[in-house]
Amino acid sequence: MRNNRIGLKLGLIIITLFLIVLVFLGFSIERMFTNYYYARMQTETEELTSHFAVMADSTDAMSEQTMKTFAEFSNVSIFNMRQDGAVILHSGVHDSSDRTFIRTSDLNKIFSGKKVNLLYEDTTGHRYFVSGQPIQGGEGVASALYVMSSTEQMEQSLSGVRNLLILSGMGAFLLALGITWIIAQFLSRPLLQMQKATRKIAAGELETRLELKTRDEMGALAEAINDLAVDLQRYRDTRQEFFANISHELRTPITYLEGYSRVVKEELYETEAEKNQYLDIIYEESVRLQHLVDDLFDLAKMEEGKITLVLEWVDLSELAEHAVRKVELKARGKNLSLSILQSGTASCIWADSKRMEQIVLNLLENAIRYTERGGIKVHLLYEAASATFIVEDTGMGIPADELPYIFERFYRVEKSRSRQFGGTGLGLSIVKKLVELQEGKIQVSSKIGEGTRFEIRFALQSEYGEEST
Ligand code: ADP
């Protein structure tokens, strides 16, 4: 019951509203019928009185008897009275001594030639319609004729109507109760399903999915919950993979450090040259660890959205030349040519110069790392609306089916490749994130055994912040 509170609330609201409408409607119909019956009876009594008045008017000796018979037949009581209150003629079931319904004001009205109508309730609780009219004599009004018609029959008909109204009201109420229950169930069931599903998701059952295919808000909410579960699942999986990768990446250099430092410490080498070789390995592995920690730190900052860019107008040509100079030594060490070419009119881009240098250096270092002969070409291409930085090498290349994954964290083409070359597997994912943070686009194309080409493109903006066309 506790779980279905929403259904209960909804049902209560609908049923309360329905009851209000039902009571209001029932009351109005009852009033309508009562008013109609009363008006009809009043007219009938008035008409009857007019008939009696005509009869009493006639000088026929039989008229008194005819009036009595007619009164009996019509089931009414009649009182014909003089102005002093004396009764000339009485007929009908109503006690002739009970004249409380006759008021002097009414009598005066009748004797002044007017008609009166009133509703009268006697001491036993019986109700009557009373109509009084003047009977003309030789000199003005001769007497006042009162006709009393019992409302009993009319009240019986009215109570029949009331019973019918109550019965149909109860029927309608029960029907509404049933329909409301169904509607409440219909509306609350998906909500309860969603509540159960979200609880399961919160408890770690991330495979939970909702099967609500409706096109309304409920369907949209269910879809949003499903999307959330998918995201959480992906997040959990990548996090697990991420931690597995980190521990793997850390374990390898640490094993080297541990092993070679022990060899040196315990003097397990034979020559001094051998010792220096081991010390070199220890140094290289510590440098690699340092890189790994730096890259991880950068990546974590970017993923948390905590990285702040210091945006300024950056001269890409100057930045590229500076980066090329930095890696020149490495290229020369591997006997690789390194050239820089520029086409179009140089223009500044709105970017973070330090992060831009990080991007360019990363691409250049990769190109040198994975190229054994030939060389690296850097091309700066300025067009009307964009500036493109291209790094092209003649290295080992990347297989086409692996190209879509090289920007993923820790992805390496051949698993031993970058260890052997000293990479961390994080460089390109950092590059892609930095490029996107600065609203650029990165593309790669490669042919195995022929070389790789990375292209990053930035839209040129006017110094007023508008993109130039
Ligand atoms: P790493 O630090 O291992 O180089 P990256 O994220 O920079 O990691 O690169 C991912 C993988 O893509 C590398 O391990 C390497 O296999 C491949 N790769 C990157 N750049 C090149 C390139 N210029 N030529 C060939 N392979 C490359």
Image (cartoon, helix red, strand yellow):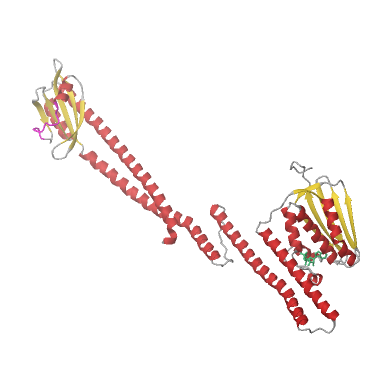
Relative to 173, 370 lies left or right: right
Q: Which residues are magenta?
A: 95-103
Relative to 404, 232 lies left or right: left
Residue at position x 68%, y 72% in the image = 247
Q: For the C terminus, which image quadrant?
A: top right
Q: Quarter-wise, where is residue 132 in the image?
A: top left
Towards the viewer: 40 or 66: 40
Relative to 212, 174 lies left or right: left
Q: Position of residue 26 (x, y in %)?
A: 33, 43
**What type of secondary structure mainly makes up the magenta span?**
loop
Towards the viewer: 16 or 126: 16
Of all residues, the one furthest to the top in this rendering is 139
453 relative to 38, above or below? below
Q: Quarter-wise, where is residue 462 in the image?
A: top right
Residue at position x 73%, y 75% in the image = 252
Q: Position of residue 380 (x, y in %)?
A: 85, 52
Relative to 17, 50 lies left or right: left
275 relative to 11, above or below? below
Towards the viewer: 444 or 372: 372
Q: Position of residue 83 (x, y in %)?
A: 11, 22
